[in-house]
Image (spheres, rainbow, N blue to C red):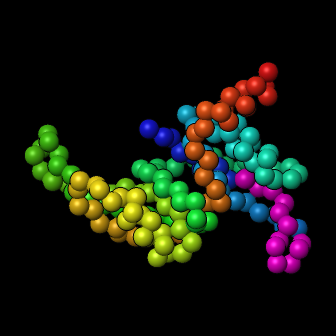
Amino acid sequence: MHTWFECKVKYVKIDEVSGREKKVNEPYLVDAVSFTEAENRIHQELEQMIRGDFMVTNIRKANYADIFPFDNADRWFKCKVSYVAIDEGAGKEKKVSNTMLVMGNDLKEAYDNLMQALDGMTVDFEVNGINESPLMDVFPYEADLVTRGQEAES
């Protein structure tokens, strides 16, 4: 099971249109076991991507049931999916909603990718909403990255 943390990072970025420097505060998602590890991991990841200084301004837990990356896509979409589950203790049906992230180049492609990822689910589900996420990138747990980070600290 993954524990996802949304990290807001402030840094100076070159505007692709005007070529001017501008200060940005962008969210990234990392898989970590604690807030401390999330901060460490976001530093490891972004040191390779951002020139100059950057500062982690906020870290919060994010509640995503699943994350579906696709190689041919470049944007993240937040999807609300619900299904009916049976409460065995009470013997009643209840509606359960989950938030998932899926990649796509546009809203239609995100929906199609979500349907592809959920194909084969044994329960009926309903997609209640899909919105573009402000997330710039998602960094799942990778054992070799953590090992490299520990070697660098030694």
Identify the residue at the far front of this view.
72
Asked if 151 appears above or below 139 in the picture, the reply is above
Q: Residue 98 location, x and y as percent?
A: 37, 55
Magenta residue span: 9-20
- Can see residue 117? yes
Q: Residue at x 48, y 69 (%)?
A: 110
- Can see residue 55? no
Identify the residue at the far top of this view.
154
Q: Residue at x 79, y 21 (%)?
A: 154
Q: How many marks?
A: 0
Q: Residue 22 location, x and y as percent?
A: 84, 67
Q: The N terminus lies in which quarter of the figure?
A: top left
Q: Residue 99 location, x and y as percent?
A: 42, 57
The answer to whether residue 14 is left or right of residue 131 is right
Q: Residue at x 74, y 42 (%)?
A: 43
Residue 18 falls in image quadrant = bottom right
The one of 70 and 84 positioned closer to us in this rendering? 70
Q: Residue 129 location, x and y as percent?
A: 40, 70
Is residue 42 inside the magenta stretch?
no
Asked if 88 appears above or below 11 in the picture, the reply is above
Is residue 18 inside the magenta stretch?
yes
The answer to whether residue 9 is left or right of residue 52 is left
Identify the residue at the far left of this view.
91
The one of 112 and 152 positioned closer to us in this rendering? 112
Residue 15 falls in image quadrant = bottom right
The answer to whether residue 111 is left or right of residue 147 is left
The one of 70 and 50 positioned closer to us in this rendering? 70
Q: Residue at x 42, y 70 (%)?
A: 112
Asked if 109 appears above or below 36 in the picture, the reply is below
